[in-house]
Structure formats: structure tokens, C-alpha cells
């Protein structure tokens, strides 16, 4: 979109203005993410999703009608509030409604839908690229999915854990029975009893504590603190790897590289992201859930590191004639431009199959009484790091050269890999209540793997008996 606004808002947008327009959404998402988890425990998950859609609609219309950079920034900020609310609550909501064994797959489906939306957005952008004021249609059409979701929200059930918080045991039991349609009545009752015990403990704790005390509990109690460290660490890694610079600035980058239709090339990047997120969904039936989230992260991060190093090398040779700096309207070697594109596509493939979706499993890390505030902080870390990356990328390319910028992102990916190796336990296949016990003594890497192994063996025995 930034490429086709041109002078519709006044003079041609400067790099600083582009960064401000891009960062406004991220700042709004940061604040929305902080608020989401805190208010969802009181008003429910569904109502937060309603507020997110209202923000999407209002922000889209504000952008479509704006005539100044300031108004555009305001519209982007409002949309960002919706992004923050949705990005925090939707994975949490899915995690609380999903059967244990397919929780990871369902959260991955959410990521697939997001990446599909990005593809559609780029396709619309390419279609309106040569239309007068076409960018207004691009941002305005963003309200359409929100209207659809608002119309459908009444058909979605509330989280059974939220219903138990409201003392609606019958409602929680009915929804749990729908989640586990093949379960016997006794099994459903047992599941509800386990959830109710956790909820009752949460209610008792919340009744005798303030918000600040709960925050202190999250930070000071070892089990909660370790969950917070892992959740925040994964979310920071997701953003500091630099992926969203491609989502935000790919058209700008490829335009400078000399591609005639930079928006169409950006569409290629978004499509690869979607396809490999789809691969991650397919793999969740054979890899992510069976093999685990930890191993998936340890395998896919090196792919990203390798691709970023390739991009840094190709950018180095590409910009030899311009002293390492990427300059608009310069005739760069087409072969090297294509190699840069290839390295970025490889990087996107690695990201989409691991780091792009696994951090959003954050809701499974926290006990119920701190789940809302914990996921809020993790989401805020995500958008805070996103703000840092989005607000500095063009300036970083000028200061450190494109080669240096992508080298820095490779370094962050390496730190992320070390973080996963030493601190990230296996949570795939464990119930939300079981994950808590993993953190009782340290980060529980071996404990989680043993617990998961025992559950898989038990499941195989039950399957053999039933057959």
C-alpha cells in the first residue's frame, strides 16, 4: 500500500513517514494486546473478539477517508488496537475450546487463516495498484471480514472455563460434551471436575488479590515466572527475526531491487508464507503434534538462519556498486536480485513451519488465574518487538546496509534457537492443567518429554484395547 499512496496525502512519503504509518498499527496492537487478557477474564473471550472487530471496522473507514498523514496514522492505530485484541484472545480462545490432542493443529489453522488473509490483501493491492485512489479501496475492504465475523459471533460458544468462572457448570458441561463428542458422560464429568477445581482455585485466589498482586504472582512464583519467560522469549524471537519487515516493506524492497511489479512480488512472498503455514498444518498431523513443538522449533530455526545469511551475502554483492546501500531507480544485476528473492522465500518457508505459529500456543503455558495477564504480557512483548523492527527497518538498512540488517536478524534467530534448546519444554499432547506441573522444578524439558511419552503410551494401550 505504501508504494501506491504516492502523493495522495501530500508530498511523497519519506522513509520516516512510512515507518510511522507502519508502526502506528504495531503500537495500537501493543496496547490492545496488553488490555485483551486483562479484560477477557471479566467480560469473556467472545466479547473481546467483538471489540476487535469494531476496531477493525472503525480503523478501516478512517484510513479510507483520510487526506493527511496524521489521519492515516490514526486509522492505522485504531486497526492496531483490534489486531492486539484479536492476536491475544483468539489463540487463547481456541486453546480453551480445543480437544487436547489437536490443540496445536487448531491454533495452526488460525495462523493459516491469517496468512491466507495476507495473500488476499496483497492480491487486492496488486489489483488496485494502477487504480486512482486504489489504496482507499484496499484499506476500506478490510472492514468486510469484520462485518462477517460480527454476524457469526453469536454462533460461537463461550470458553467453558469462563462459564465456570461465572458458576455456569451446566453450560460448561454442555460445551465440553460438544468438544469431546465421543466421550462418555463420566469422562465429560471428570474433565469438567478437573477444570472446575482449577477455576475454583483461581476464583479464590482472585477474590483475595488485586491486579498488582496477580502480576507479582506471575513474576515471583517460579512456575508462573518460567512460563512467562518461555512465552515472552518465543514471542520476542518471532518478531526480532525480522520476518514482518518482509510483510510490511516487501513491495518497497523489491521495488528498489528493480522488479517492475513489486506488489506482485510481495504477493509471491505472502503466498509462500501461506503455503508453508498450510504445510505446517498438514505436518501437525504427522510432525508438530506427534513429534512436538520443541523439535519443530529446533529444526526450522536453522533453516531461517541459513536463509538470512544467504540474503546478507547476496545483498553484499548486489550493492557493491552503490557502496553497500540500496538505492531506488538503480539498475542492479537481475540475477542477484532473483537470488535475494530466493533466499527470502526460503526464509519465509522456515518461518511459516515453526516460528510463525508455535509461539501463539502461549495460552497453554499459564495457570488459569494468571492466563489472561500472562498472555497479555506475551502478546505485548510480541508487538513491542514488532514495533522496534517495523519502526527501524528502513533506517537500519541505511545505517547498517541491507547486508548488515539481515545479518543482525540472523543473529537474533541464533539466539532464539539457543533459547529453545535450553529453556523450551515439550507441551504438545499435554492438557492445560498438566502443563503447569512441568514448571514445578526448573523449565522441565526432560520432565515434559517423559510425561508426554507416558501419555502417548497410555493412548496406544487404550487404542489397542478398543481394537
Image (cartoon, grey):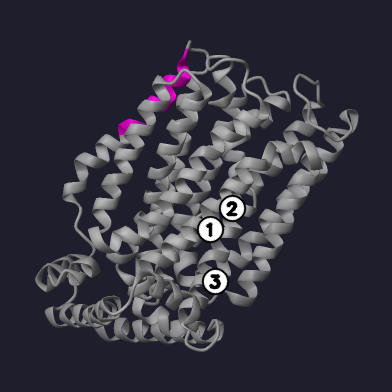
The residue lying at 42 percent from left, 85 percent from top is: 437
Residue at the disc numbered 2: 385
Distance between the Cα atoms at labels 2 and 1? 6 Å
Q: What is the span of residues highlighted in magenta in the rendered image?
A: 133-144
Residue occupying image coordinates x 67% and y 54%: 304
Residue 141 in sight: no
Instruction: Residue 229: give its label.
Output: 3
Query: Which secondary structure type mostly characterizes the magenta part of the structure?
Result: helix
**Marks 2 and 1 in Cβ contact (< 8 Å):** yes
Q: Is residue 136 magenta?
A: yes
Q: Position of residue 80 (x, y in %)?
A: 44, 41
Judge by depth and name the residue closer to the eye, 339 or 309: 309
Q: Which residue is mark 1?
A: 381
Q: Is residue 275 above or below residue 254?
A: below
**Residue 364 at least partly seen:** yes
How far apart marks 3 and 1 lie (CA) works out to: 11 Å
The disc, 3 or 2, on the residue closer to the chain's N-terminal end is 3
Mark closest to the chain's N terminus, 3 or 1: 3
Q: How far, Cα to Cα, is label 3 from label 2?
A: 15 Å
Amino acid at each position: 500500500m505504501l508504494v501506491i499512496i504516492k502523493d495522495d496525502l501530500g508530498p511523497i512519503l519519506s522513509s520516516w513517514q512510512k515507518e510511522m504509518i507502519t508502526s502506528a498499527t504495531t503500537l495500537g496492537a501493543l496496547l490492545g494486546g496488553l488490555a485483551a487478557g486483562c479484560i477477557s477474564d471479566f467480560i469473556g473471550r467472545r466479547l473481546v473478539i467483538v471489540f476487535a472487530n469494531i476496531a477493525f471496522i472503525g480503523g478501516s473507514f478512517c484510513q479510507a477517508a483520510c487526506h493527511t498523514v496524521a489521519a492515516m496514522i490514526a486509522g492505522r492505530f485504531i486497526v492496531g488496537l483490534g489486531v492486539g485484541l484479536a492476536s491475544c484472545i483468539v489463540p487463547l480462545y481456541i486453546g480453551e475450546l480445543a480437544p487436547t490432542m489437536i490443540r496445536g493443529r487448531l491454533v495452526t489453522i488460525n495462523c493459516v487463516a491469517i496468512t491466507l488473509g495476507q495473500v488476499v490483501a496483497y492480491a487486492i493491492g496488486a489489483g488496485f495498484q494502477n487504480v486512482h485512489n486504489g489504496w482507499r479501496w484496499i484499506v476500506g475492504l478490510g472492514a468486510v471480514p469484520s462485518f462477517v465475523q460480527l454476524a457469526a459471533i453469536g454462533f460461537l460458544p463461550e470458553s467453558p472455563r469462563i462459564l465456570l468462572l461465572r458458576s455456569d457448570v451446566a453450560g460448561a458441561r454442555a460445551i465440553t460434551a460438544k468438544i469431546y463428542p465421543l466421550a462418555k458422560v463420566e469422562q465429560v464429568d471428570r474433565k469438567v471436575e478437573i477444570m472446575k477445581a482449577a477455576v475454583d482455585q483461581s476464583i479464590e485466589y482472585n477474590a483475595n488479590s488485586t491486579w498488582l498482586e496477580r502480576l507479582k504472582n506471575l513474576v515471583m512464583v517460579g512456575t508462573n515466572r518460567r512460563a512467562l519467560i518461555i512465552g515472552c522469549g518465543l514471542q520476542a524471537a518471532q518478531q526480532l527475526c525480522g520476518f514482518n519487515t518482509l510483510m510490511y516493506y516487501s513491495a518497497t524492497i523489491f521495488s528498489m531491487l528493480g522488479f517492475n511489479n513489486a506488489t506482485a512480488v510481495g504477493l509471491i512472498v505472502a503466498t509462500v508464507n501461506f503455503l508453508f503455514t498450510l504445510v505446517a498444518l498438514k505436518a501437525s498431523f504427522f510432525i508438530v503434534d506427534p513429534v512436538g513443538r520443541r523439535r519443530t522449533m529446533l529444526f526450522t530455526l536453522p533453516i531461517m538462519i541459513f536463509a538470512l545469511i544467504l540474503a546478507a551475502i547476496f545483498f553484499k554483492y548486489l550493492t557493491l556498486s552503490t557502496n553497500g546501500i540500496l538505492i531506488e531507480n538503480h539498475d542492479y544485476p537481475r540475477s542477484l536480485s532473483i537470488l535475494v528473492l530466493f533466499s527470502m522465500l526460503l526464509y519465509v518457508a522456515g518461518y511459516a513451519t515453526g516460528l510463525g505459529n508455535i509461539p501463539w500456543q502461549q495460552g497453554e503455558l499459564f495457570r488459569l488465574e494468571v492466563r489472561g495477564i500472562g498472555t497479555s504480557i506475551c502478546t505485548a512483548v510480541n508487538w513491542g518487538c514488532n514495533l522496534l523492527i517495523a519502526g527501524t527497518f528502513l533506517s537500519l538498512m541505511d545505517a547498517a546496509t541491507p547486508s548488515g540488517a539481515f545479518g543482525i536478524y540472523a543473529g537474533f534467530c541464533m539466539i532464539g534457537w539457543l533459547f529453545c534448546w535450553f529453556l523450551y519444554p515439550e507441551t504438545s499432547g499435554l492438557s492445560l492443567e498438566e502443563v503447569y506441573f512441568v514448571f514445578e522444578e526448573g523449565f522441565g524439558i526432560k520432565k515434559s518429554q517423559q510425561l508426554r511419552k507416558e501419555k502417548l503410551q497410555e493412548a496406544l494401550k487404550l487404542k489397542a484395547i478398543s481394537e
